[in-house]
Structure formats: C-alpha cells, structure tokens
Amino acid sequence: MAQMTEVVAQIADLLRNSRHAVAFTGAGISTPSGIPDFRSTASGLWTTTSVNPMDVASINGFRQNPKAFYDWIYPLLSVIQHAEPNPAHDALAQFESMGLLHAVITQNIDNLHKVAGSQQVLELHGHIRQATCTHCFQAFDAAPIIQKLLEDRTVPRCQDCRGVIKPDVVLYGEQLPFQVVQDARHQAENADLMIIIGSSLEVAPASDMPLLTLKKGHGKLVIINLSPTHLDHRAQVHVACDAAQLLPDILRRVEQSI
C-alpha cells in the first residue's frame, strides 16, 4: 500500500508540474467498462473467436465478405452499446478541465472518452459514431444502424444505392485518418509528459506516438498497463495495475495539492 501511495504521489507531481501533458490510451482503459481488449488470453477478440481477425477485419476481407465482418464484430458492438465510461475515463476528463491535460490520443473506437467529457480526443483508429456507404459515400449516424444490426444481424445497406455501409473505424489495410494522425503527432511532439494507459504498444503506427515524446529529450513517459510493454524501461514511472482504480487516486492527490 505504501509503495502504491508513492506511485500515486509521483505521477500526480509529474502531471501537476508538466507544461504539456497528453494521454495515450488503448483497450485496457475500457476493459473495466466491460469492453474486451484484443489480445488478452481470457477475453481478447483475437483469442476467443474461431476466425482470424486479420481476415475478417481487413478492408479486403470486408469488401469480399461484409457478413463475416459483422458476425465477428457483433458481440463487441453489443457490449459497446451498453458500456459506460469508468473512473479512468472520468479522471482524464477532469484533468483536461483543470488544464492539466492537453489531449487524449486513443486507439479505441468506443467513444467513451467523449462520453466522459474529454474535449480534445484524437481517435487514431476511427470511431463508431458514424458510418459510411462504401458505394456512394453517404455518411450516416451509426447509432440506428448498429441498433438494427443488433436486432436482425443483417448487413447494413444504403437505402439510396444499396451499397454496404461500413462503420468509420480503421480496418487492417486502411490508412489512419490523416488529419487526426497529424494532430496526434503534434501533441506527442510537444508533450513533456505522456501518460500511457492500457496499451500494449504493439500496433503501429499508433504505438510510435510515445517515441515522438521521448525524441525531444525532455519528454517523460508514465506507463499504466497490466502487461509489460517494450518501453517500460524508458518510462519515468511504470505500474501494472487497473487504471480505473489508480487514476481516481491520482486525481484526488492533484486536487489536494491545489
């Protein structure tokens, strides 16, 4: 307990004394909200299904067999629809409102950072708020499309041209959204502190963002992740714990010092 108290104090001090802090989040920040990550043995989408995600969740796979993609992502969409932000999401939104956090760079598509109240959210892998027809490129509010999919499990199609509708998430083989990536790079390059939460840092190019913070020489990393990452040895603080428990403690520590 004493050691964790010291970790909380150290991270709180780093955040309070930073000039430009950003957060970088992965699936691990949303697992306390009930959303499975991709890689864990117990619940990861890579390990609990009989299909290869590289096949069904690639843009080529989607074009060839959209039904297989929607069958694969169906359980995730069902969970996301009912998920609520957890205390880790809430704490990051509070840090931003206090002027201590400039942006959240996220690999997640679940929209929970925005629901929690974070304003500057850079979604590297897209989001499920919107969907687009792959034929006529008409954009749609994704909520009713997802709801209908969950009810009848049929591939969503455009009412105008009957083209297949795809959620605005980045599939394997697709480019990341250019402007979002540029904005994220700008935030990472200017950060003197990056707090990495719930990411294995295995998925490039998103996982390169922490290197941009380190590249300037004065940038510091804090890594909060249950499993090891390849940058643990370069972090100012590395702690393997549940972010939904740790971040509220850091928030309270910061509030006490103001």
Image: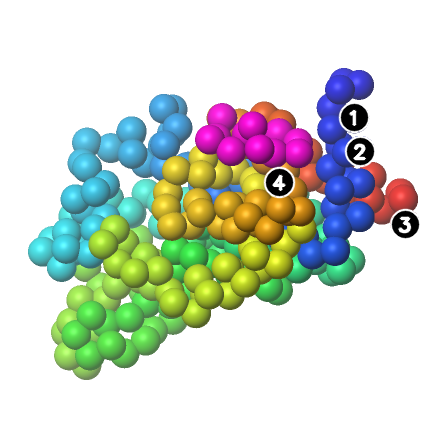
**Does the magenta-highlighted stretch encompass residue 248?**
no
Please provide percent x and percent y for residue 229: 48, 30
Please provide percent x and percent y for residue 56: 18, 46
Q: Nearer the viewer, residue 46 or 197?
A: 197
Judging by the rendered image, the residue that carries numbered circle 1 is 5
Residue type, numbered disc 3: Ile
Of the image marks 3 and 2, the number of the one nearer the N terminus: 2
Q: For the residues marked 4 and 1, what is the alpha-carbon distance in whole angstroms?
A: 19 Å
Pair 3/4: label in front? 4
Of the image marks 4 and 2, the number of the one nearer the N terminus: 2
Crowd rating for badge 2 (residues with CA inside 10 Å; few <14, some 14–19, many 20+): some
Circle 1: element type: helix
Of the image marks 4 and 1, the number of the one nearer the N terminus: 1
Q: For the residues marked 4 and 2, what is the alpha-carbon distance in whole angstroms?
A: 15 Å
**Which residue is painted at 16% across and 44% down in the image?**
55
Circle 3: element type: loop
Picture quarter with the N terminus:
top right
